[in-house]
Each structure stands twice: as C-alpha cells, then as structure tokens.
Image: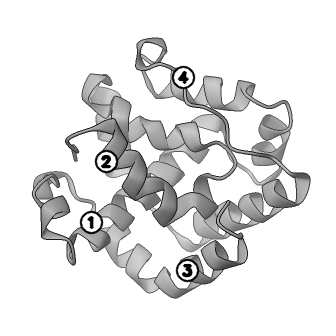
Amino acid sequence: MKMPSRLLRMRVLLPLLAVLVSIVPLWAQAQVAAPGLPEADKQAIASYNLNEDVFNRLVAATKEARAQGIKPQQPPANAQVHNLDDLANQAVGSDPRIAPLIKKHGFTPREFLLANIALMNAALVVQSRSQPEMAQYIDQSKVNKANVSFYEAHQSQIAALQSSGGGQ
C-alpha cells in the first residue's frame, strides 16, 4: 500500500491506532519506509498474519507501556532505515524499557513491528471503505484479507482500548 505523503499517512495512522503504536510510534513509519524496503521485508509485511495470541499480547504490551509511562518517540529520518530490522532496532533503542517489555510479552522487536504494521494495514483498508480519497492509494493486490477480517472482528475491542488510552 502506498499513500501520497508522510503527513497524510501519519494523520490517518496515528489517530486510528495510537493505542497500539503508543509504545513506539516510529514503527508506524514502516509504512512510510515501505517503498524503500527490500523485497523480502515487503513480503514479510504482506504475509504476516494476525491471530488471537498476537493480538492479546499486543494489547497487554500496550496497556503495560501506558502504565510505565512510555511516551511516543520521534521517528528516525528515512535515510537511517534500510530494512525492518533497522526500524525495529531504532525503535527498541529509543527507550530502555521497550526491549524488556516486548520480550516479556513474547515478541522480538521485528515481530512486534510486523504485528503492528499488519494491524495498521488492515485498519487502513477498513477505513478506506468509507473514505474514497484514501481508497485510491490502497493496492488491493497487496491487501492481506485475513488480517482485514481479523481487524473487523476486533474493531470494537480496539476502539474501546483506544478510547481508554486517553488519546495517547
């Protein structure tokens, strides 16, 4: 999926899923960086499948991050990101509490990044259904339909979690 600008992408992604990227919003930048990512990383993003276990661990990590007061970090310049591992390592390095937190919830930095991107991509697809101006930027051939269905099935839980986060 590609969007016309970083500003539009961040305007759409952060309010929609701030709850799930509140630990490290720069992981949302993987969408921004996606055009420059190696093909293997793009394929990893497209093929990552959400499931109940991953979702429950994301929710738990997000709640714990809030409780610890972990605040959003500024994303790195795109020139510093050459692949998903660079992005994940920069994210984890932005606050010393992040690595132990995601490890506690059974994630590697890369998997945590992939899970968040998968959820954000699904959210964008769902949101684009009611926003034709956004829909034109979604490459339907790259949509993971299983993740979209998963997101739709959990939309009310995500909305409740988002509203309980106080807009973080």
Quarter-wise, where is residue 62 in the image?
bottom right
Which element carries disc 3, helix, strand or loop? helix
Disc 2 versus disc 1: nearer the observer: 2
Residue at which label 3 appears? 159
Q: Residue at x 55, y 30 (%)?
A: 75
Q: Residue at x 45, y 60 (%)?
A: 119
Above or below, comparing residue 38 to residue 52 in the picture = above
Residues under labels 3 and 2: Cα distance? 21 Å
- Nearer to us of marks 3 and 2 is 2
Query: Horizontal and vertical percent for residue 52?
Result: 57, 73
Above-or-below relation of 82 to 66: above
Give residue 87's position: percent from left, percent from top.
53, 27
Q: Give the answer, above or below, for where 103 lies relative to 88.
A: below
For mark 2, what is the residue?
Answer: 8
Q: Earlier in the sequence, mark 1 or mark 3?
A: 1
Dot 2 or dot 4: first in sequence order is 2
Residue farthest top in this picture: 79
| Distance CA(mark 2)–CA(mark 4) | 18 Å
Task: Say which of 16 and 148 sits in front.
Answer: 16
Contact between marks 1 and 3 (CB within 8 A): the answer is no
Which amino acid, by three-letter code, is at mark 1?
Val
Name which residue lies at 85% across and 39% down. Answer: 100
Residue 151 is left or right of residue 75, and the answer is left
The residue indicated by pointer 4 is 76
Three-letter code, disc 3: Ala
Q: Residue beneath label 1, please? A: 125
* Three-letter residue code for mark 2: Leu
Q: Can you say which quadrant of the picture contains the C terminus?
A: bottom right
